[in-house]
Image: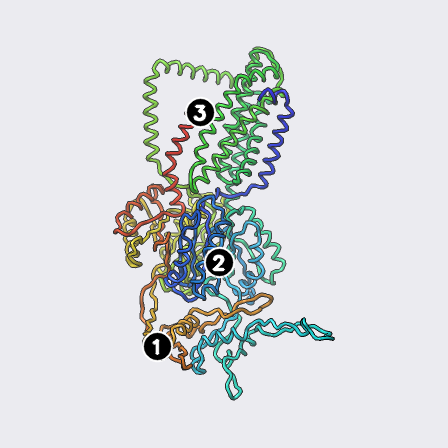
Amino acid sequence: MSKFFIDRPIFAWVIALFIIVMGAVAITQLPIAQYPPVAPPSIVISATYPGASAQTLEDSVLSIVEQEMNGSPGLLYMESVAQANGTGSITLSFQPGTNPDLAQVDVQNRLSRASPRLPSAVTQQGVRVDKARSNFLLFAILSSDDPKLDPVALGDYASRSIVPEIQRLNGVGQVQLFGTERAMRVWIDPAKLVSFNLSAAEVTAAIRAQNAQVSAGEIGSLPNVAGQGIAATVVVNGQLGSVAEFGKVVLRANTDGSAVRLRDVARIELGAQTYATAARLNGKPSTGIGVQLSPSGNALATAKAVRARMTELEKFFPKGMTWQIPYDSSRFIETSLRQVAETLLEAIVLVFLVMFLFMQDWRYTLIPTIVVPVSLLGTFAALLAFGFSINVLTMFAMVLVIGIVVDDAIVVVENVERIMSEEGLPPLAATRKAMGQIQGAIIGVTVVLIAVFVPLAFFSGSIGNIYRQFAAVMGTSIAFSAFLALSLTPALCATLLKPVEAGHHHAKSGFFGWFNRGFARTAKGYEGGVARLLPHAARYLVVYGVIVAVAALMYQRLPTSFLPSEDQGNMLVNVQLPPGATRQRTQAVMEQVEGFVLKQPEVKSMVSVLGFSFSGQGQNAALAFVTLKDWSERTGPGSSAQALAGRSFGALMGIRDAFIFPLSPPPIPELGSSSGFSLRLQDRAGLGHDALLAARNQLLGMASKSKVVTQVRPDGLEDAPQLQLDIDRDKASALGVGFEAINSVISTALGSAYANDFPNAGRLQRVVVQADAPARMQPDDLLKLNVANAKGQMVPLSAFASTRWVTGAMQTVRYNGYPAMRISGSAAPGYSTGAALAEMEQLASQLPPGFGYEWTGTSREEKLAGSQAIILYGFAILAVFLCL
């Protein structure tokens, strides 16, 4: 093979140039990410049941859908979460390598089988099936100092003109609006309804009947009469478009010609569709747009595309509206890759200097220097062919492999130089002879080196994605290096090197002379040391065995973890108030948090979201995304994200009205919302919610006494007081009140009812009916609601129902079909995450029978990796032995 390229150097150059071009093209096409796609492909099913409790949502919606999802091809695990605000989701995680598009189609088909069994209010709202990552790539914030552009106006503009534009960008998964678009809000007064002998159901029915689009047809349509000379479409003004028009809706027409209209019993306004969440930027009310990356999205390219599109859209913003992106997780990815790329260049320069130091001739040094970038560019082409990405691990592998890929070229050049200096042969003849001596050795060494890394590609699960890409870079780089050592390197030696006289040696004076003499003394000393050791080989074999045994013992005692926690340039703050706390109380606490965090010298900006957190949704929940200043501006030991999180935790503990937990992001955001471990405690024996809660508290109590784990906490919303309405069905039946009418009145008054849509500035928006705020603030207001009986008479709920206070779940979780509770925590200082997992497993084993647990997120992947590592490393050693 080498002789062919030695005689045809131009052909060797053509192949090398082809590799260079393919690699350069691949670099522009490869996706860029922080890590390989470690998280399993996930599909999320989202549903809304207005006014439903968490338990009602779980029983009537999520559990039904879950049953249909069992058996989905490639399904690893699923988790459903029901919130007390009527929203719920099921996250289905599939085996790595599963096509997310096909998985989404299968989930959609299975959901269609469950849809007929779901409540009509749920299907009317729509059940969504999406594929997207769970973490946010970035947050775009809209704000204004103009009072006319309040958060509702900002949210409405964003939903119309910004969110659709961003959703169409390549790489964008989901776009979540932390704000709201407008809706026609009909705030009914229950007392006025009673005075007119009307029910809430009649109000909703009247709106649906009189706010309807009519397709009237046309006059003169075919077939028409002879001589018809005109045809025209008939337009009926069916849909209402303003507050005044909705106010004229007739609820009842009296015999005397008068009428009861909607404005007589309700306050009508163009308000917000939902009041569930609210965003703040640095303490100022605003509207947030959270962008999630698609499973195959390029983080850097997508973030750049979002910024570019926002810049384009800014030209059409209303006067006074501004935007900014205060939170962008791609910033850390870009910085990490830039640092690795700089390290790669530094490694190439150092390799060049070391080669020049020993070869002491620029021609000899140039040949391996040419081969290194060609090998690396060929590796980029292979990454594109394999469907991999440019990420921190693949770039790190390239840094490591530089020292290996240059070896083959150095061996060739050194052997050619030796033959030329010892035998005086010309470069062409010396190259032919040198390759005849070392060609087999190059192939053998290449096979052995590749055999070391090939077993790593057989890791299963998400860990396999990490090792697979690392092994691919190492293996392909080594393979390209060997190929070039057998093709391009000998061709370069035959054409670039100049003849030397026999007996030629390196320089004997100057710097190189001093270096050569010192190196010769070192080599001679080493040879003497080896000569002294050889007569005592058995003794030193024993020493070698002791070293191996000590290394194995130290390996077993090394702390373990999945990936190290890094300063990603941002911090999360999870805020949870006591159960039953209102939005006003949550905002007051968040203002205190903002007051502390924004004063820290490391902080650049802070985005707060009220009503939303990774633990759950509700009035008592909030979450803050804190962006830190650039790493170059934070050089002190206490300026890292982890240090700030620890300092903030201690300072914010003084706020007694809430549980405030600052968190540093996890190494892989797709596998969790914070660093540390994540566990799901399961009720596998059907012991009930109270027993599961007691077991969770027992586990938390034991963990609080452990020295191995710290900050072990429930990751969810706590149970809260709930107002239980007890209906005497016998009394209701005697009064002629139907149960369906009772449900309709209660859900409309307290939970809201979606009537239909109306046209507003070129967009259809919702008409929502709900009791006005003063009529639903106190427990007694519930019993004052009236229901129409079979005779049309209004009957108050107090006539056949009573209320009492109970404690109920604000959030229910099911993991793989079992009722579960989330528990998160971290390893204590001085302990690894592996030790923390083992400690939690030991504590969980002390729980009463009937309770189990499963790891999730990074913890699950760490457990899977630990069970495979020893076996696969053993296979690597075996493969090397067999190759040798």
Identify the image's colour scheme: rainbow, by chain, secondary structure or one colour. rainbow
Describe residue 19's horizontal placement relative to residue 655 as left or right: right
Q: CA distance from mark 1 to mark 3?
A: 85 Å
Which residue type does callout 1 highlight?
A: Ser
Estimate how packed mark 1 is, as few (under 14), some (14 to 19) or many (20 or more) residues with alpha carbons within 10 Å. some
Tell me the quadrant of the picture where the C terminus can be found.
top left
* Disc nearer the start of the sequence (1/3): 1
Residue 762 quadrant? bottom right
Q: Which residue is mark 2?
A: 128
Q: Quadrant of the N terminus?
A: top right
Question: Which residue carries the number 3 mark?
Answer: 883
Q: Relative to residue 556, is residue 223 drawn left or right? A: right
Residue 746: give x, y in percent of width and height. 40, 72
Q: x and y percent of residue 716 in the render?
A: 37, 56
Q: Is residue 48 left or right of residue 698?
A: right
Identify the residue at image location x=53%, y=47%. Answer: 297
Can residue 587 be seen in the rendering of this structure? no
Label 2 to label 1, Cα distance in Å?
Answer: 38 Å
